[in-house]
Image (cartoon, helix red, strand yellow):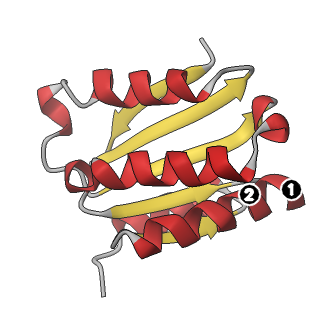
Amino acid sequence: MPVIFEFADGIIVLRMVDLYVPDDIQKALLKGLTDPRTSGAVGLLFDVSRSKSLRVRTSDDIVAMGYFLAQHGEAFARRVALVGFDDFPFAMMRMGRVTLEREGITSEVFREATDARKWLLQAPS
C-alpha cells in the first residue's frame, strides 16, 4: 500500500511509502475524506519520508499536487505540514509549500513528523 491515509488527534495524515503515482495520493485523500471522523480536522500532515517515487517527480508534478491539496483545503482547516527527512525531499516539499501558500494554505516544512504534528496541534496564530 504505497499511500497510507490515517486520522488521529484531529490530523489527517498522508504517508507516501516506496513507489506510487500522484493519482494514488489523490485517491487516498479523496477516499479518506469520505470518513465522517475527518470532519473538523485541524490539518494535514503530508509525509514523504519513506517515498522512493519522489525522486522521479518533476517540479510540475509538485506544483500540480499543491493545487490539488489546496482545492481540498477546507477539509483540513487550510493547514498543511509537509515532512521530508533529508535534503532532496525537504527541498521538494519547500517547493510544494510555495504553491500551497499562493493558494491561501498555511504550511510549514519539517524534517520530523513529530515536529509537524506539534505545529498542527498548535492554535493558528
Question: Which quarter shows the C terminus?
Answer: bottom left
Is there CB contact under 8 Å for labels 1 and 2?
yes
- Give me the C-alpha separation between circle 1 and circle 2: 6 Å
Residue 6 shown left or right of residue 23 in the figure: left
Residue lying furthest top: 1
Measuring from the top left, give residue 54's x and y in whole percent: 76, 38
Q: Nearer the viewer, residue 82 or 102?
A: 102
Q: Residue at x 20, y 37 (%)?
A: 38
Measuring from the top left, give residue 68's x and y in whole percent: 41, 45
Residue 88 shown left or right of residue 92 in the figure: right
Quadrant in the picture for residue 102: bottom left
Residue lying furthest front: 60
Measuring from the top left, give residue 17's x and y in whole percent: 69, 26
Residue located beneath label 2 in the image? 92
Residue located beneath label 1 in the image? 88
Q: Residue at x 49, y 54 (%)?
A: 66
Q: Residue at x 76, y 45 (%)?
A: 58
